[in-house]
Image (cartoon, rainbow, N blue to C red):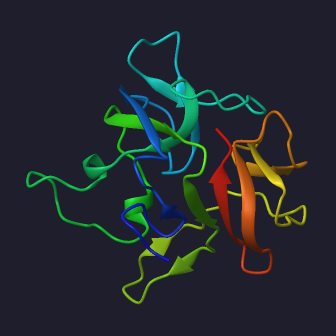
């Protein structure tokens, strides 16, 4: 299921009565490019900026949640056009973004393998969810130490999501926000 957020993350239910998109903070100026769907939090050391969330930190609406960079992740008329399905999953550094939460809003995650396109362009693999532990419907998802969503027990205080559908073999799942 592709969306404007690339091949690895998207919405199943994003009704604004469920979803909270808080603030207009910027992605970090330096460091690795962040993926749509990464867990982020407000960076107290850099006002106006976000940083990757601390592993195991619980969701806090307006402070910590899922990174979304909406229309800003498309190229402008001043940039070389090279938008691909992979590229849509990346966020631009130092660009306005939002922290997203909202009990009942539903997302999907899918890990993808590296591949080489027909034109020879190498597309790296992306893993937003750690599927090394089998994930089941009803499990929680929390932000883990390897900067991936990881399985936690149902009802765990660090869970940002509850899994509603999963295919461990295909490394695909759907989940609803708990807060």
Asked whether residue 37 appears in the rendered view, the answer is: yes
Q: Is the residue 84 above or below the residue 40 in the image?
A: below
Q: Residue furthest left?
A: 77
The relative height of residue 141 versus residue 168 in the rendered view (above or below) is above
User: Which quarter of the picture shows residue 145?
Assistant: top right
Name the residue at 33% across, 49% down.
70
Q: At 44% from the left edge and 59% from the top edge, which residue is drawn?
A: 89
As drawn, 89 above or below 115: above
Q: Is residue 35 left or right of residue 56?
A: left
**Horizontal arrangement in the rendering, residue 64 relative to residue 73 (left or right):** right
Residue 133 point in image, percent of width and height: 90, 61
Residue at the location (44% across, 84% down)?
117
Note whether residue 33 is visible.
Answer: no
Which percent across, then down, holds residue 64? 58, 29
Q: In this view, does 30 lie to the left or right of 144?
A: left
| Residue furthest bottom as drawn | 118
Q: Nearer the viewer, residue 51 or 177?
A: 177
For this orientation, the residue located farthest to the front is: 17
- Quarter containing the C terminus: top right
Q: In this view, does 135 lie above or below 120?
A: above
Count of numbered circles on the image: 0
**Residue 4 place in picture, x, y as percent:** 36, 64
Residues 68 and 26: in front is: 68
């Amino acid at each position: 299921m592709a969306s404007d957020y690339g091949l690895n993350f998207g919405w199943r239910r994003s009704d604004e009565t469920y979803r909270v998109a808080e603030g207009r903070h910027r992605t970090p100026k330096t460091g690795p490019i962040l993926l749509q769907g990464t867990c982020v939090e407000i960076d107290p050391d850099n006002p106006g900026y976000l940083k990757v969330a601390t592993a195991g930190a619980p969701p806090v609406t307006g402070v910590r949640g899922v990174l979304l960079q909406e229309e800003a992740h498309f190229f402008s008329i001043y940039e070389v056009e090279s938008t691909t399905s992979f590229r849509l999953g990346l966020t631009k550094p130092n660009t306005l973004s939002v922290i997203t939460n909202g009990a009942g809003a539903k997302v999907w995650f899918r890990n993808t393998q590296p591949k080489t396109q027909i034109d020879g362009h190498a597309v790296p693999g992306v893993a937003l969810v750690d599927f090394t532990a089998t994930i089941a419907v009803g499990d929680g998802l929390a932000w883990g130490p390897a900067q991936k969503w990881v399985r936690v027990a149902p009802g765990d205080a660090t869970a940002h999501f509850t899994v509603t559908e999963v295919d461990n073999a295909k490394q695909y799942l759907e989940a609803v926000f708990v807060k």
